[in-house]
């Protein structure tokens, strides 16, 4: 949803979206008494950049079969996609973890 | 002498001591908490939760302290009571995602902590959770996966023809996946085979010229294979400091993604469709 106005920055959009999921997940998990990941992880699955990841990987494999010039272009866009994918995954996980990192700081159970 | 070192390294020394447990009781406790941890690790819980749950069950059952080591395919647990200790290692093979098992084991551990379950009750509960069949009928899973892939094709800007092709392709691919799973193929082979099937059928959008953007159908029809939970768990483990499990999860996830790309490329090579 957020990716509309913020098209230029899919990563920030993913961060904002998953932070909302994380907050709602903590709240729902407390009400229904189930572990948070039941809501949080499944909640961000629609934001997982699956098709972008395919594009990047297929691009990387295809580079081998193209001429140098075409290959260089494709390589650049594939690597850019790949970096985007990695950043989005990072943003999703950080977003989910935000409420836990902020509101549930407790002494570690295991030292 | 030794006691001082022990006190510094063992936080339980500072806590009020529980009544000592016999060697046999320790064995029983370690078995139960390891079993709970195994169920969690098998069904896709993150490392933090596994450590906490095993620790919680063990200490609630009367141990002074539990040390837990979670590795991607093994668990090591040491239970301590009044200087007596036992350690057990168990090899664990991940079985895939089942949030229901994770939720049930977590709520069991909370009941144990509140003192509502004794050891035999925990044993029968864990047996029940471990044996429980999948929650959803396989055809329901097929329908849901196909529908979500098709919905994604619309989000990517495909028309209704693309929607229909994606729906068909991912439904058939999902059935193929379930069949391959039943034959116990290697997980990567399953992924490549499923993506190949999906790509093969989705290529029809290009071959029969069903839509101006046939490539959307090809990409969207294998979206149900994306290891989203695996990769998010990887980053989450990384944030919480479990670097080894994180690297293993990320590697496995990337491998699965590459498998999907390989399957799609094979399908494109066979049908000659363009992406």
Image (cartoon, coloured by chain):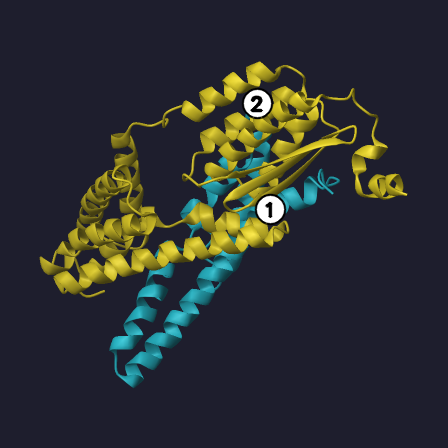
Chain colours: A cyan, B yellow
Q: Percent x, y for residue A57?
A: 35, 64
Left or right, B167 with reference to B70 = left
Question: Which residue occupies 50% across, 23% down?
Answer: B126
* Snapshot quadrant of residue B175: top left
Query: Could you tell me how far apart the alpha carbons at marks 2 and 1 are, in whole angstroms?
Result: 24 Å
User: Is there a contact, CB below 8 Å, between mark 2 and mark 1?
Assistant: no
Residue A25 drawn above or below residue B242: above
Residue where numbered disc 1 is placed: A97
Instruction: Please name the residue shown 25% across and 76% down the image.
Output: A65
- Do the residues marked 2 and 1 share a common chain? no
Mark 2 Cα shell of 10 Å, populated few (<14), some (14-19), many (≥20): many
Which x, y percent locates residue B187? 33, 47
Secondary-structure class at tag 2:
helix
**Residue occupying the point 51% across, 29% down:** B103
Q: Position of residue A85 (x, y in %)?
A: 44, 61
Q: Residue at x 51, y 17 (%)?
A: B124
- Residue annotated with mark 2: B108
Horizontal and vertical percent position of residue A91: 54, 55
Placement of the N terminus of chain B among the 4 image quadrants: top right
Above/below status of B130 relative to A19: above
When the figure is inspected, residue B19 is found, relative to residue B263, above or below; the finding is above
Q: Mark 1 lies on which chain?
A: A
Crowd band around label 1 with a 10 angstrom C-alpha radius: few (<14), some (14–19), many (20+): many
Q: In which quarter of the image is the C terminus of chain B?
A: bottom left
């Amino acid at each position: 949803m957020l990716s509309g106005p913020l098209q230029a920055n899919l990563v920030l959009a993913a961060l904002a979206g998953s932070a909302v999921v994380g907050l709602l997940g903590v709240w729902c998990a407390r009400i229904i008494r189930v572990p948070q990941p039941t809501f949080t992880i499944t909640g961000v699955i629609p934001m997982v950049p699956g098709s972008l990841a395919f594009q990047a990987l297929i691009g990387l494999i295809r580079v081998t079969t193209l001429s140098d010039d075409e290959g260089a272009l494709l390589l650049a866009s594939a690597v850019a996609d790949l970096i985007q994918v990695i950043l989005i995954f990072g943003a999703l996980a950080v977003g989910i973890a935000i409420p836990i990192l902020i509101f549930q700081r407790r002494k570690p159970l295991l030292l | 002498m030794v006691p001082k070192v022990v006190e510094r390294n063992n936080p339980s020394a500072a806590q009020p001591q529980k009544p000592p447990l016999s060697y046999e009781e320790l064995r029983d406790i370690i078995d139960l908490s390891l079993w709970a941890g195994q169920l969690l690790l098998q069904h896709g819980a993150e490392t933090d939760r596994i450590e906490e749950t095993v620790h919680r069950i063990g200490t609630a059952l009367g141990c002074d302290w539990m040390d837990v080591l979670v590795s991607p395919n093994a668990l090591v647990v040491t239970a301590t009571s009044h200087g007596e200790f036992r350690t057990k290692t168990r090899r664990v093979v991940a079985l895939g995602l089942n949030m229901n098992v994770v939720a049930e084991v977590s709520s069991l551990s909370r009941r144990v902590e509140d003192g509502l379950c004794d050891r035999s009750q925990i044993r029968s509960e864990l047996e029940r959770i471990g044996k429980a069949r999948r929650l959803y009928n396989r055809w329901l899973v097929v329908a849901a996966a196909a529908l979500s892939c098709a919905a994604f094709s619309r989000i990517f800007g495909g028309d209704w023809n693309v929607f229909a092709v994606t729906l068909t392709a991912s439904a058939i691919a999902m059935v193929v996946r379930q069949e391959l799973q039943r034959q116990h193929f290697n997980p990567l082979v399953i992924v490549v085979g499923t993506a190949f099937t999906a790509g093969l059928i989705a290529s029809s959008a290009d071959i029969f010229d069903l839509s101006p953007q046939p490539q959307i159908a090809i990409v969207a029809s294998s979206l149900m294979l994306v290891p989203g939970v695996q990769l998010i768990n990887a980053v989450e483990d990384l944030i919480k400091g479990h670097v080894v499990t994180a690297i293993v999860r990320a590697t496995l996830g990337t491998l699965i993604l590459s498998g999907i790309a390989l399957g799609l490329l094979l399908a494109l090579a066979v049908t000659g469709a363009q992406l």
